[in-house]
Image (spheres, grey):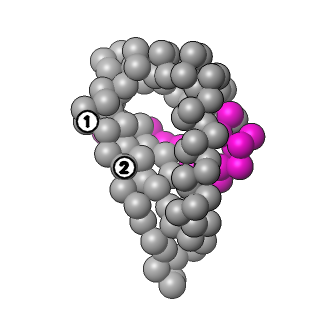
Amino acid sequence: MFFELRQYRIKNGQRARWVKLMEETIIPFQVSKGVVVIGSFIAQEEEDLYVWIRRFESEAERERLYKEIYESDYWIDEVKPQANEMLDRERMQNTRLEATPKSVIH
């Protein structure tokens, strides 16, 4: 099992719109496909930072879910164009994490 810590930088003035898209569209769609979303966050001191964490049981599961989500017509035609309007893709960071034994997240 591993986690993805995804850190996005949102274009100026777009954070509220981005959070709405995440909470009303992106997260529900991904959860419907089987993704486990651990949390969704905005930074208190950085107006352009949005962070979310997803959990995967294995690399095979991650690959399958990525294919189902990111290659779907819905993602390509509906979600991605909206996301591209709001995300500073060059500053995005994706970090894989493994929980330590004492972590409360598993």
Distance in Å between CA atoms under marks 2 and 1? 10 Å
Q: Nearer the viewer, residue 23 or 58?
A: 58
Q: Amino acid at mark 1?
A: Arg
Q: Is residue 28 magenta?
A: no
Residue 65 horizontal/vertical position (percent): 61, 47
Please provide percent x and percent y for residue 5: 43, 53
Q: Where 87 sits versus 61, above or below?
A: above
Q: Which mark is residue 91?
A: 1
Asked whether residue 42 is drawn in magenta, I would say yes
Left or right position of 80 against 90: right
**Amino acid carrying mark 2 in the image:** Asn
The furthest residue to the right? 32
Task: Please name the residue shown 68% across and 34% down the image.
Answer: 29
Disc 1 is placed on an element classified as helix
The quarter of the image holding the C terminus is bottom right
Q: Which mark is residue 94?
A: 2
Report the span colored magenta.
29-46
Q: In the rendering, at what x and y percent does residue 91 appear?
A: 25, 36
Left or right, residue 88 beside residue 22: left
Residue 56 falls in which quadrant of the image?
A: bottom right
Residue located at (46% from left, 80% from top): 100
Residue 23 visible at all: no
Residue at the far left: name it. Answer: 90
